[in-house]
Image (tube, helix red, strand yellow):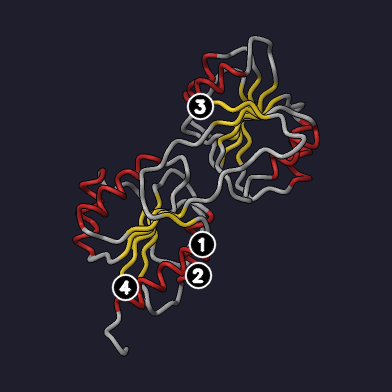
Amino acid sequence: MKLLILGGTGEASALARALAGDSRFSPVLSLAGRTRHPAPQPLPTRQGGFGGAAGLARYLAAEGIDLLIDATHPFAVEISRNAVEAARATATPMLTVLRPEWEPAPGDHWLLVSDMPAAAAALGDAARCVLLTIGRQDLAPFAAAPWHHYVVRSVDPPPPESLPPNAEIIAMRGPFLAADERRLLTEHAIEVLVTKNSGGSATVAKLHAARALGLPVVMVARPSKPASETRATVAEALAWLAARHAASLPRGA
């Protein structure tokens, strides 16, 4: 069965590894292209957008895609919306892989906010040293609070014009260890952490480190993903694929 995986997450990479060499499927992994040097993948890979829902629908039809998996980031709402519309337009069975959210634990000091402008406002009027782990696309709202010192961590360095004033860059790719996260927070004298509620294990160590140091966390809530059949884990997604493949076989095969 021909399979398109919309990726860019650890779950998508894990699916790619699990499906490499599986003769039941002919998968292609699609990456948005926002990361300059994506990690090598064991599957045929394409980069770049499709041109909205209509473009993705054309791709699904032209390539004869049998199954579609949306394993994009929990905050990647636009591509997920396009995927749902394209799957509906082409009658392509689709599954969304959506990892569970992080939940506060005893000792956490979370301030929950709805979006990035609210996160910037939540930092307050007193100058603070702030660690931003929100990716390169969402930095603009923090220019409205230029009195803070920002430490910006992302896989690739953000364009200089997107940075708030008084910012320094740390270019790093997860996963991260709790001891390293605690060292980063201490060495940079971080007073507050701003992050998205992405969930997953690759970057959760920063929350453990913030808890250990008693630091507040401004936590940006997830947006709602469009309605789709959903599984939380790679194992569940693989079981879904196996069931779809079995259902496609002739009786008695």
Q: CA distance from mark 3 to mark 1?
A: 28 Å
Q: Residues within 10 Å of mark 3 (few under 14, many from 20)?
A: few
Q: Residue 45 in the image: x percent, y percent?
A: 39, 60
Q: Is residue 17 above or below residue 187?
A: below
Residue ranking furthest to the top? 125
Who comes first in sequence, dot 1 or dot 2?
A: 2
Who comes first in sequence, dot 2 or dot 3?
A: 2
Residue denoted by label 3:
114
Q: Is residue 41 above or below residue 87?
A: below
Q: Amino acid at mark 4?
A: Met
Q: Residues within 10 Å of mark 1 (few under 14, many from 20)?
A: many
**Disc 1 and disc 2 in contact, CB within 8 angstroms:** yes
Q: Quadrant of the N terminus?
A: bottom left
Residue denoted by label 4:
1
Q: Residues within 10 Å of mark 2 (few under 14, many from 20)?
A: some
Q: Residue at x 50, y 20 (%)?
A: 117
Q: Amino acid at mark 3?
A: Ser
Q: Quadrant of residue 251?
A: bottom left
Who comes first in sequence, dot 4 or dot 3?
A: 4
Residue ranking furthest to the bottom? 252
